[in-house]
């Protein structure tokens, strides 16, 4: 027979093994990717592609579901992720610089240490668009309209993101003054533009690519032309040094077991070796660009410092 001490030792050993057993079975229920923006934008489009390949490479029987949680420029979504059970079943989208900007310009309940950083999967350039039948069909048209005193509204996902930073650079370079209309995502900004509710919008290439018959592209904010919009010149080609993109990656709540974090990171690495994943990303005009967990977290920390310095020098709210 086991004495009391031996029973306690066995129970302690069983308790210690329980997380390992759970991790060995992971995933055995649905996984949720929480997207802090509305459907149809670059973050949402990317997450839906990534979700299909997480299903494939996490080696479980679970489905991956994308949950759109709009509000406060992604803050509500990341708050939910930071407070979720650290069991691997809640994944958050984290965008640079947007997610950082919203941490700097307002009070939030999380910080960088609230998350386990996984991998980043894309750097999606910004583009400035107008309606297809609009008189503003080029940057020179825009510059002239601004010089003539035109009052223009500009749709964007929200303040403190790369679209906002890009718009401020456009204002400075072309002598414009926009009335900003934050719309909770670049998909919503594109829709508002197409519906005639705003005059211009800054969105990611992936959010506008499938709507080329409905919008004018005034320029791409990258060092070279987008492979998806090869006829659209860069801002630099047109004489304006404006380069801006959204780098998108993924996080888990702090405290997620290392074995599960490693499982995710192995899945992301396998995705980028899969030609079908690369084709699916390309089909959605999302440039595939991989950073592993260490490089991704390093970029986030670097960008955090840069955004804090920008805020201290020129606060945008």
Image (tube, grey):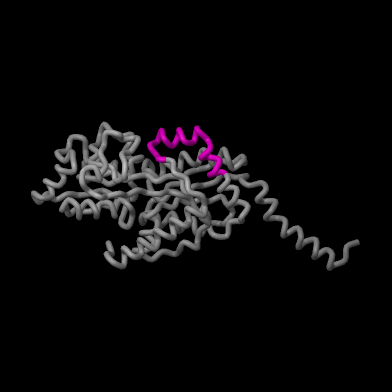
Position of the C terminus by quadrant? bottom left
Q: Looking at the picture, tell me which residue is in the foreground, 72 or 293.
A: 293
Q: Is residue 231 magenta?
A: no
Residue at horizontal 15 percent and vertical 53 percent from the top: 175
Position of the N terminus by quadrant? bottom right
* Span highlighted in magenta in the image: 267-287
Residue at horizontal 31 percent and vertical 35 percent from the top: 229
Q: Looking at the picture, tell me which residue is in the foreground, 80 or 222.
A: 222
What is the x, y in percent for residue 97?
37, 55
**In the drawing, does residue 90 fall left or right of residue 21?**
left
Residue at horizontal 67 percent and vertical 48 percent from the top: 24
Q: Looking at the picture, tell me which residue is in the foreground, 194 or 224.
A: 224
What is the x, y in percent for residue 64?
53, 42
Residue 189 in view: no
What is the x, y in percent for residue 37?
38, 49
**In the drawing, does residue 87 fall left or right of residue 246?**
right
């Amino acid at each position: 027979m086991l004495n009391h001490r031996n029973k306690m030792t066995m129970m302690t050993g069983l308790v210690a093994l329980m997380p390992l057993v759970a991790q060995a079975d992971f995933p055995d229920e649905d996984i949720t990717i929480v997207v802090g923006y509305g459907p149809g934008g670059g973050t949402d489009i990317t997450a839906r592609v990534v979700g299909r390949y997480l299903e494939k490479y996490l080696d479980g029987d679970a489905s991956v579901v994308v949950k759109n949680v709009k509000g406060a420029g992604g803050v509500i979504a990341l708050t939910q992720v930071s407070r979720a059970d650290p069991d691997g079943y809640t994944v958050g989208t984290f965008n640079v610089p947007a997610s950082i900007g919203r941490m700097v310009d307002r009070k939030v309940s999380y910080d960088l240490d609230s998350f386990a950083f996984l991998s980043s999967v894309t750097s999606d350039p910004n583009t400035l668009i107008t309606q297809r039948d609009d008189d503003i069909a080029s940057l020179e048209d825009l510059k002239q309209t601004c010089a003539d005193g035109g009052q223009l509204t500009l749709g964007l996902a929200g303040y403190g993101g790369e679209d906002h930073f890009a718009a401020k650079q456009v204002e400075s370079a072309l002598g414009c003054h926009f009335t900003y209309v934050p719309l909770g995502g670049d998909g919503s900004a594109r829709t508002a533009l197409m519906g005639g509710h705003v005059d211009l919008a800054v969105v990611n290439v992936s959010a506008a690519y499938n709507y080329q018959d409905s919008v004018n592209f005034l320029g791409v904010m990258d060092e070279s032309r987008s492979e998806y919009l090869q006829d659209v010149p860069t801002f630099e080609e047109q004489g304006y040094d404006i380069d801006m993109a959204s780098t998108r990656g993924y996080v888990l709540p702090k405290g997620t077991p290392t074995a599960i974090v490693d499982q995710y990171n192995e899945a992301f690495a396998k995705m980028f070796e899969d030609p079908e994943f690369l084709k699916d990303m390309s089909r959605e005009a999302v440039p595939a660009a991989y950073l592993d967990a260490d490089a991704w977290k390093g970029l986030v920390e670097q960008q955090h410092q840069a955004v804090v310095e920008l805020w201290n020098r020129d606060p945008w709210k």
